[in-house]
Image: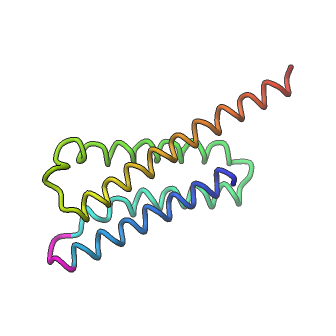
């Protein structure tokens, strides 16, 4: 699967995690503002993925932007996990943990893709 499609899939996972978090917050009569955080990261990833499929000449730049979003996603989830994981409800832990895993996996896939592209470019030049 191509990185733009993987980027879109990762964005969809984050949006779904946000929907689960918002639904849980509403059912428990709690504020759902923070449950929208994965939604915003997911939307950015979806936009990067879709635009890179439409604008092939911008793919490299958009995939680098996607990698930055994946890094920020991972960091944004790592902080609350490190600070207060033991105080989180099960649903919150699942949502934040899912956000962390999604961002980390995407970041690893981006790095692997960038390395492969660089090797392919070098093999073509030599």
Residue 84 in picture, x, y percent from top left: 16, 47
Residue 26 in picture, x, y percent from top left: 22, 78
The residue stretch that appears in magenta: 27-31
- The residue at the point 64 percent across, 54 percent down is 4
Q: Relative to 22, is 11 on the left or the right?
A: right
Q: Name the image quarter holding residue 60.
A: top right
Color encoding of the figure: rainbow
Residue 91 vs 66, above or below: the answer is: below
- The residue at the point 20 percent across, 49 percent down is 85
The kind of secondary structure the magenta stretch mainly shows is: loop
If the image is split into quadrants, where does the N terminus sit? bottom right
If the image is split into quadrants, where does the C terminus sit? top right
- The residue at the point 24 percent across, 61 percent down is 92
Residue in front for this viewpoint, 89 or 70: 89
Q: Relative to 4, is 31 on the left or the right?
A: left
Residue 11 vs 121, above or below: the answer is: below
Question: Number of callouts in the render?
Answer: 0
Residue 68 vs 36, above or below: the answer is: above
Q: Name the image quarter holding residue 32.
A: bottom left
- The residue at the point 78 percent across, 29 percent down is 121
Q: Name the image quarter holding residue 53.
A: bottom right
The single residue placed furthest to the bottom in the displayed view is 27
The single residue placed furthest to the top in the displayed view is 126
Residue 125 in picture, x, y percent from top left: 85, 23
Residue 107 in picture, x, y percent from top left: 50, 42
Residue in front for this viewpoint, 54 or 34: 34
**Residue 51 part of the magenta-drawn span:** no
């Amino acid at each position: 699967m191509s990185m733009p499609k993987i980027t879109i899939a990762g964005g969809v996972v984050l949006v779904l995690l946000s929907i689960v978090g918002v639904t849980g917050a509403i059912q428990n009569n709690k504020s759902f503002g923070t449950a929208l955080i994965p939604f915003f990261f997911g939307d950015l990833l979806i936009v990067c993925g879709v635009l890179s499929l439409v604008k092939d000449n911008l793919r490299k730049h958009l995939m680098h932007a996607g990698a930055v979003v994946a890094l920020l996603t991972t960091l944004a989830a790592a902080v609350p996990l490190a600070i207060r994981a033991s105080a989180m409800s099960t649903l919150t832990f699942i949502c934040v943990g899912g956000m962390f895993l999604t961002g980390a996996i995407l970041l690893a896939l981006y790095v692997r893709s960038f390395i492969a592209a660089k090797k392919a470019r070098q093999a073509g030049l030599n």
